[in-house]
Image (spheres, rainbow, N blue to C red):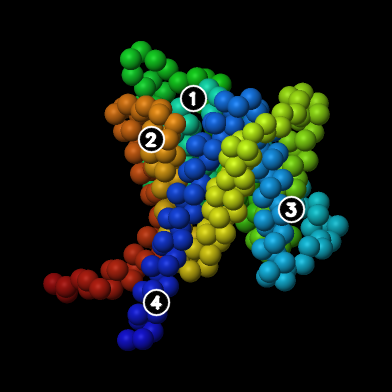
Amino acid sequence: MGNFLYMIKTDLKGYALAALAAAAYGTNPIFAVPLYESGLNPDSVLLFRYLLGVPLLAAIMAVRKTGFRLSGKEAVSTAVPGILMGMSSLALFESYNYMNVGIASTLLFVYPVMVALLMSLFFKEKFRLSTGICLLITGCGLALLMKPGDDATLSVYGCVAVFISALTYAVYIIFVNVSPTVRSIPTIKLLFYVLLWGCLLFAARMALASGATVPASGEAWLNVAALALIPTVISFACTTKAIQLIGSTPTAILGALEPVSAVVLSMFVLGQSISPREIAGGILIIFATTIVAAAPALEKAWPNVRKLFPQRQV
């Protein structure tokens, strides 16, 4: 009985952490949009977000007594996920300038479908019927979002930016999973170097093109600090712990709270509106990606479920 209660307590803790991680990541827009309004560009917002996130992660590593040293091969290998994550963040934050941030966050959630499709195409992973069905459902959801109503259409540039963000994030997830060198690096340590590479990417872009803008008020610095803490360090730390407690599939399924959190916050904090048609499109996308995330676990559990209902011999 004691072991059973302990398992229940552990599962509840894992689900709570996964939900908190998803909700925390959905706060990205409410801190980024006010920074845009104060004059910062996406490169500057992300540079300061990453820069403030680095010492927070360094503190966590110090508490856990995780070393900072990397081999030459590890240092080179972290560049790929670092640049991919930086590109994904930049594309998403760029899309906020062209479309409703809640819709942008919902469109971003097509990345689990992209992961499943890319794994099937390039790594010979089994293409499930559920994945094909989910692609059709996702297409229907996108069709609803692409024409929100009142004869208005979404910004093509904004949509392209979100899809680049989703694609680069999908490739990031795949690379981290298939690279033996990257998989051998502790999670927090990997994120530390991912953020460092992202800082280099944003600094290079600012030097070559966009130019540097600096937060000019205490409120702006608070928003940057919140970006570094809530959707970066807290979200990632909670996700990592949730995976350890309940596994990657339930954690991924609860990731559906990310766009929900972003939509609700964009409506009540930023005052942005969303139509019933957009809500319907978002629900279809979240439903499809949830099926993709749950399919492997359901397939694995199905034989055990069948054993509970033995067939009668005629």
Identity of the amino acid at label 3?
Tyr
Cα separation, mark 4 vs mark 1, equals 43 Å
Task: Look at the numbered disc 2 and give the secondary structure of its residue.
Answer: helix
Residue occupying image coordinates x 73% and y 36%: 202
Q: Nearer the viewer, residue 168 or 195?
A: 195
Report the residue marked by disc 1. 99
Any part of residue 304 in sight? yes
Give the number of callouts: 4
Disc assigned to residue 268: 2
Q: Position of residue 184 (x, y in %)?
A: 70, 64
Task: Look at the numbered disc 4 and give the secondary structure of its residue.
Answer: helix
Q: Nearer the viewer, residue 239 or 267?
A: 267
Q: Of label 3 and label 1, which has the lower sequence position? A: 1
Q: Are marks 3 and 1 in contact (CB under 8 Å)?
A: no
Q: Of label 4 and label 1, which has the lower sequence position? A: 4
Report the residue marked by disc 4. 7
Cα separation, mark 2 vs mark 4, equals 37 Å
Q: Quadrant of the N terminus?
A: bottom left
Q: Position of residue 129 (x, y in %)?
A: 39, 47
Disc assigned to residue 193: 3
Question: In front: mark 3 or mark 2?
Answer: 2
Identity of the amino acid at label 2?
Phe
Identity of the amino acid at label 4?
Met
Residue occupying image coordinates x 42% and y 35%: 269
Relative side of 203 to 39, left or right: right
Q: Mark 4, residues whose alpha carbon is within 10 Å: few (<14), some, or many (≥20)? A: few
Q: Quadrant of residue 138?
A: top left
Task: Look at the numbered disc 1 and give the secondary structure of its residue.
Answer: loop
Q: Mark 1, residues whose alpha carbon is within 10 Å: few (<14), some, or many (≥20)? A: some
The image shows residue 277, relative to residue 173, as above or below, that is above
Farthest left residue in view: 314
